[in-house]
Image (cartoon, rainbow, N blue to C red):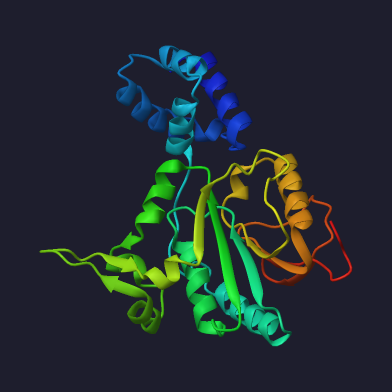
């Protein structure tokens, strides 16, 4: 590939999504760009760059970001976090909170927010405590998969068998082995396209819990600083933030208190 064009595309991707693709990720970028070149029917990357730059609708840029986004996840990923979430939800209800707002900030194909919803159903009295989960991702393609809520049995192996029985339906149809998330669980989750690299965030109201796992590893330190600052602003005093086990807050000034591996709490007295 033309190195100059590749650098321009890399810069464009970073500017529009925050995804940083260093030199050692060049082959990954090239492989994924080939999908869009074939789809657009163009011969080379320079012609494709022109298509992206001249597309006033932004649709091709969205498709480009879709193919470079990494979406690997499963239900109950980093299982210990869901045990901690169970304790947090029970404690909030015990303290008298009657509405709990959570955000899955890089939801991929839905396994994380649906796992959060199942934990909420198991932990809370739905007659007393309402739960609202916002699930966002930059990829339109992956959000459509999440909305379909269909999964094969192999994707459910990390879930306790009781949850599979209670919260999944077998899809009808000859030869179908799909399992679908029940309407009850799906009703707790709202999916929306969202770009974590665009500030300030347009979310309203304060959140109780934010999950943002396995995405900031693709961002620069400066972008991670900005994201953490927004999370702190959006969380209510005493709210919780979950990162992945492969992420940390090294090099980032923050006011969070570490509770467990990759689990943080905003102190009660801190606002904004």
- Relative to 129, is 235 above or below? above
Q: Nearer the viewer, residue 137 or 70?
A: 137
User: Residue at 70% across / 79% down in the picture?
Assistant: 97
* Residue that lies at the very extreme toward the right in this rendered image: 269
Q: Quadrant of the N terminus?
A: top left
| Count of number-bearing discs | 0
* Residue that lies at the very extreme toward the left in this rendered image: 174
- Dividing the picture into quarters, in which one does residue 246 lie? bottom right
Image location of residue 229, percent across then percent down = 78, 50
User: Residue at 38% across / 69% down in the picture?
Assistant: 183
- Relative to 134, is 179 above or below? below
Image location of residue 141, percent across then percent down = 40, 43
* Residue that lies at the very extreme toward the front in this rendered image: 127
User: Residue at 56% across / 74% down in the picture?
Assistant: 82
Image location of residue 238, percent across then percent down = 78, 71
- Relative to 145, is 20 above or below? above
- Relative to 184, is 26 above or below? above
Image location of residue 182, percent across then percent down = 36, 71
- Dividing the picture into quarters, in which one does residue 178 lie? bottom left
For residue 31, say whether it is visible: yes
For residue 205, side relative to residue 29 (left or right): right
User: Residue at 44% across / 16% down in the picture?
Assistant: 51
- Dividing the picture into quarters, in which one does residue 84 lie? bottom right
Q: Quadrant of the C terminus?
A: bottom right
For residue 245, say whether it is visible: no
For residue 88, side relative to residue 268 (left or right): left
């Amino acid at each position: 590939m033309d190195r100059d064009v590749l650098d321009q595309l890399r810069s464009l991707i970073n500017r529009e999504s925050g995804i940083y693709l260093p030199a050692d990720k060049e082959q990954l970028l090239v492989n994924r760009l080939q999908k869009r070149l074939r789809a657009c029917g163009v011969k080379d990357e320079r012609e494709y760059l022109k298509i992206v730059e001249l597309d006033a609708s932004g649709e091709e840029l969205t498709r480009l970001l879709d193919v470079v986004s990494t979406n690997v996840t499963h239900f109950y990923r980093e299982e210990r976090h869901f045990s901690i979430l169970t304790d947090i939800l029970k404690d909030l209800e015990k303290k008298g909170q009657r509405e709990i707002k959570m955000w899955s900030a890089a939801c991929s194909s839905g396994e994380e927010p649906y796992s959060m919803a199942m934990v909420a159903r198991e932990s809370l009295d739905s007659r007393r405590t309402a739960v609202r989960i916002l699930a966002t991702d930059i990829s339109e393609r992956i959000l459509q998969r999440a909305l379909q809520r269909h999964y094969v049995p192999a994707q459910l192996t990390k879930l306790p068998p009781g949850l599979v029985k209670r919260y999944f339906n077998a899809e009808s149809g000859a030869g179908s082995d799909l399992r679908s998330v029940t309407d009850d669980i799906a009703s707790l989750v709202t999916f929306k396209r969202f770009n974590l690299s665009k500030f300030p965030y347009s979310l309203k109201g304060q959140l109780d819990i934010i999950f943002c796992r396995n995405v900031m590893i693709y961002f620069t330190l400066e972008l991670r600083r900005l994201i953490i600052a927004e999370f702190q602003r959006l969380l209510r005093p005493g709210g919780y933030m979950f990162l992945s086990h492969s992420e940390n807050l090294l090099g980032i000034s923050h006011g969070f208190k570490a509770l467990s591996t990759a689990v943080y709490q905003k102190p009660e007295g801190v606002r904004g």
